[in-house]
Image (cartoon, rainbow, N blue to C red):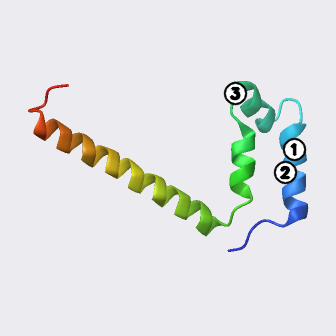
Amino acid sequence: MEKLSKERLKKIGELFKNPRPGGKIAAAKEFGIDLTLTYEQLKKTPQERLDDLQNAMRGLEEIARAGTEWRTRNNGRA
């Protein structure tokens, strides 16, 4: 899959900046969702987003592994 076209991204950016009152984008914005993060992700291809998620998962697995090793060395004491 390819990235969204520049035209499509521009339209989405405009919608995010000026959402239709009462719409779902406005509700998300009012709820406090940072739409700039969503917009930045939409600039990437689906594969790039998947790669980012896989890298994040590897990082979390490493943190979990380090925690397990630390608890093993310290007999479970914090």
Percent position of residue 77, x then y: 14, 26
Residue 24 location (% of width, % of height) = 76, 37
- The residue that appears at 69% across and 44% down in the rendered structure is 37
Q: In what quadrant of the picture does the N terminus appear? A: bottom right
Q: Quadrant of the C terminus?
A: top left
56 left or right of 24 in image: left
Mark 1 — residue?
Answer: 15
Q: CA distance from mark 2 to mark 1?
A: 5 Å
Q: Which mark is residue 32?
A: 3
Residue displayed at 89% across by 36% down = 20
Answer whether labels 1 and 3 touch (C-beta < 8 Å).
no
Q: Examine the rendered structure and indicate whether residue 53 appears above or below residue 35.
A: below
Local SS, label 3: loop
Q: Position of residue 11 (x, y in %)?
A: 90, 53
Q: Which mark is residue 12?
A: 2
Q: CA distance from mark 1 to mark 3?
A: 16 Å
